[in-house]
Amino acid sequence: MEAKTDTQADSLKRVFGLATLTIYGVGDILGAGIYAVIGKIAGISGSLVWASFAFAAIVAALTAWSYAELGSRFPRSGGVAYFIHQAFRQEWLSLLVGWLMFCTCLVSMATLSKAFAGYLNAFIPGFPDWAIVLSLFAALTLVNFRGIAESSALNIVCTAIEVSGLIIVILAASTFLLGGGTNVDAGTANAIANTSAVPWVAVIQGAALAFYAFIGFEDIVNVAEEVKNPERNVPRAILLALAIATVIYTIVSLLATSVISPSVLAASNAPLLDVVTRSQPNFPRVLFAFIPLFAVLNTALLNFVTASRLLYGMSREGLLPAWLSQLHHRQRTPYRTFLVILPIVIFLALSGTLQFLAGTTATLILLMFCGVNLSLLVIKQRYGNRVEGGFNVPFVIPALALLSNLILIAFASKESHILASVFVGIGLLLILLHRIFMKVEPSKTK
């Protein structure tokens, strides 16, 4: 009986179908990003905030096509680190990319925990941020430990709530505008008049920040081993989730800047809440204000799941100590990875600011996407442009995706460049230590 339990713990449960996997992706994309950054983007690109979202969507879509083919070719946990390993067969490069992807998840989790603390303190003041952060991560750890089925169930609930919040914004703003409402008031007329002069550079700068709101579709690949028929469902779920998010973002951004001027939207700490209040003053503020809490909770949970599965996949491929690839004998979850994740993310959450961490997250993920697209180019060249029975994209797609990733990185803030460089440096140092350790270890066994 014990042998059966051990055998079952050697593999992850396949619980995702196409519908639940698409919801998983939509929930990850439609998280705290749109609720938090739309105002800041409006401050950069003015009333052309929708153009920034559209540009970011194009960049994300190009890379999503690359992810879709790679996910079809290699339906394994480990994500970008595994793709890099398949393309270049360089252990140090796979370790570096895996480390940076891991850092991306942790920085995003830290960003979201600070947003959660801010929203909660707005209605229940008096609790210190550190206590809220620790409580949040304790709850997320429990859910993640229970297993992917429980995580998926919570994800579906949170996704429904956060999407309902965006639907409220769309309905409230549409009703307001159809009724003859305008966004012109005494303090903002000049700001609106000047938005037509926003240069294309500002639109791309806004897109570099807007890209944060599209992060999430790549997480689908990291749960590929928990998907039924992954060769078929993984690429379809990636593209469906991104398409749904793009449509919603475009509509919301157009309506938001039609109800409230970009300058006012940029100064708001709760931009979409202000849009609803301006559109429908009688709508209960408290009811809508709790929706971002669920959005933040959902995205933080999915980042946690991704980080743990990423470490698990890299460990199983021999890129990290095998100790991390051990599954819990009953829950069949990679619980040991939590001991690595929690100390780092708590430190980041308690020492960084929300805007700084969000910008760094976007820069790091764009670096990862460069690696993904470059990997697909190499793999296509080595193994052939097409795979029979798999999901295939033209050679030009990953090339354009790589170029667009580099463009957005160039337009990101200098601060995000600096912190991303720090993470790269730490990763290289860890790789050097890993190589030294690997050289010393065999001599001990002689």
Image (cartoon, grey):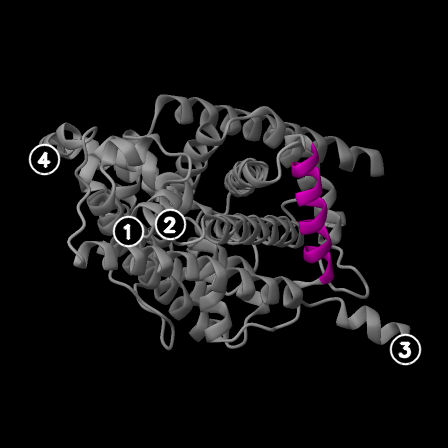
Discs 2/4, front: 4
How far across and down, in percent of the image, does residue 39 sit?
33, 37
Pick whichever of labels 2 and 3 is earlier in the sequence.
Answer: 3
How far across and down, in percent of the image, does residue 283 sit?
40, 54
- Residue located beneath label 3 in the image: 1
**Real-space Cα distance between discs 1 and 4?**
22 Å
**Real-space Cα distance between discs 1 and 3?**
51 Å
Relative to 157, is 1 above or below? below
* Mark 1 neighbour density, 10 Å: few (under 14) some (14–19) many (20 or more): many
How far across and down, in percent of the image, does residue 218 sit?
44, 54
- Residue located beneath label 2 in the image: 214
Task: Determine the main secondary structure of the stretch shown in magenta.
Answer: helix
Q: Amino acid at mark 1?
A: Ala
Q: Amino acid at mark 2?
A: Phe
Left or right: 320 as drawn, with respect to 119: right
Relative to 16, is 426 above or below? above
Q: Are marks 3 and 4 in contact (CB under 8 Å)?
A: no
Pick whichever of labels 2 and 4 is earlier in the sequence.
Answer: 4
Q: Are marks 1 and 2 in contact (CB under 8 Å)?
A: yes
